[in-house]
Image: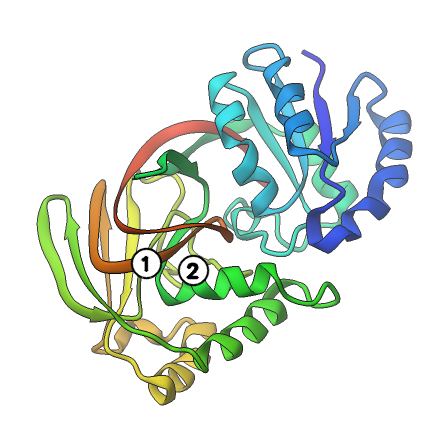
């Protein structure tokens, strides 16, 4: 079946638009049968995917946010996902072994590589059910994601998230959380955040749960407990180096189902995209529901 190559010109703060002509030219030379589309509007992008033959291949030129917004359509049509990572986050691309590939190498792989099954997560809250590919942040890290989404366009990737982290430290707030992992109470007390990861990293490459896998039928919970401003600031270099998991206020757990309750509104962000705050939500793993092309 003919593949659709869909470029999100808003990815990476609008810098992805510069790839439109080079991608067209590459496709004309190497994959003339492929259909190319530029989708400024998410509604048009969704309509394009809804019109694709079931089981066909879609190559998204964008980042985690691009994938996140189109996950419902990818799942509804059982589409095969190829990814050319040019976004600000690219944590799903990292888990797929695509981080650091030149865009033309990633495009060739996305069009011609074999696909394998990938897990997803699903958030359920008052707003309904929503799938996510990389992470569901709840608390301080979700507030960081919101600040990063509103940050200066000249910052991208990990520096953008670090800028947002330093900004959020000034308004640091812990919340009392009750976290249930597969039906059992796992945490009851103050915490900075209680976030769920499918990929080893989030926040544009921070190795939050280095052992997480996207094909093991489980998600990984990461809880940061009673940290103040100084403690959070000192923990940041440990997180960037992946050495934070030994801290007594940091805990992880693998799970199939999870529930979080909070007495006040809790900020949320899925795949780096800010969502409406809520006081309770649940998450479950969706094993192997997405077919995706990996680097090897």
Residue that numbered label 1 is attached to: 266
Residue closer to the observer: 117 or 74: 74
Q: CA distance from mark 1 to mark 2?
A: 9 Å
User: Is 217 drawn above or below residue 281 in the view shown?
Assistant: above
Residue at x 58%, y 75% (from the top left corner): 163
Residue closer to the observer: 45 or 203: 45
Q: What is the secondary structure assignment of the residue under circle 2?
A: helix
Classify 10 Å Cα crowding around label 2: few (below 14), some (14-19), many (20 and above): many
Classify 10 Å Cα crowding around label 1: few (below 14), some (14-19), many (20 and above): many
- Quadrant in which residue 20 is drawn: top right
Image disc number at residue 53: none
Is label 1 or label 2 in front?
1
Q: Are the two marked residues, 1 and 2, in contact with CB atoms closer than 8 angstroms?
A: yes
Spot occupied by residue 40 in the image (x, y as percentages of width and height)? 74, 36
Q: Earlier in the sequence, mark 1 or mark 2?
A: 2
Residue at the extreme left: 184
Residue at x 72%, y 55% (from the top left corner): 13
Q: Quadrant of the N terminus?
A: top right
Q: What is the secondary structure assignment of the residue under circle 1?
A: strand
Q: Quadrant of the C terminus?
A: top right
Residue that numbered label 2 is attached to: 142
**What colouring does the structure picture have?**
rainbow
Residue closer to the observer: 45 or 205: 45
Count of numbered labels shown in the rendering: 2
Q: Note whether residue 184 is visible.
A: yes
User: Is 34 drawn above or below residue 229 in the view shown?
Assistant: above
Q: In the visual, does 266 lie left or right of 3?
A: left
Spot occupied by residue 41 in the image (x, y as percentages of width and height)? 70, 34
Residue at x 75%, y 67% (from the top left corner): 154
């Amino acid at each position: 079946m003919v593949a659709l190559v869909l470029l999100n010109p808003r990815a990476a703060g609008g810098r992805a638009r510069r790839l439109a002509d080079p991608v067209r030219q590459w496709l004309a030379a190497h994959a003339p049968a492929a259909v190319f589309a530029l989708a400024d509007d998410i509604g048009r992008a969704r309509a394009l995917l809804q019109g694709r033959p079931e089981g066909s291949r879609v190559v998204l030129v964008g980042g985690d946010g691009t994938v996140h917004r189109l996950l419902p359509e990818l799942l509804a049509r059982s589409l095969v996902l190829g990814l050319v990572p040019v976004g600000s986050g690219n944590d799903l691309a990292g888990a797929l072994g695509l981080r650091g590939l030149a865009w033309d190498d990633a495009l060739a792989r996305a069009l011609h590589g074999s696909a394998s099954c990938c897990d997803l997560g699903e958030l359920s809250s008052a707003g309904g059910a929503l799938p996510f590919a990389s992470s569901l942040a709840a608390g301080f890290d979700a507030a960081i994601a919101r600040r990063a989404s509103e940050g200066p366009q000249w910052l991208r990737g990990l520096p953008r998230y670090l800028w947002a982290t330093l900004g959020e430290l000034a308004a640091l707030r812990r919340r009392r959380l009750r976290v249930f992992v597969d039906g059992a109470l796992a945490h009851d007390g103050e915490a900075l955040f209680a976030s769920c990861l499918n990929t080893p990293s989030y926040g544009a490459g921070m190795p939050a749960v280095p052992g997480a896998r996207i094909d093991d039928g489980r998600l990984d919970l990461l809880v940061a407990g009673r940290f103040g401003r100084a403690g959070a600031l000192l923990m940041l270099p440990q997180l960037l180096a992946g050495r934070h998991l030994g801290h007594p206020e940091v805990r992880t757990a693998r799970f199939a189902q999870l529930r979080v309750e909070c007495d006040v509104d809790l900020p949320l962000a899925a795949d780096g995209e800010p969502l409406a705050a809520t006081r309770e939500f649940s998450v479950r793993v969706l094993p192997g529901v997405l077919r995706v092309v990996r680097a090897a």
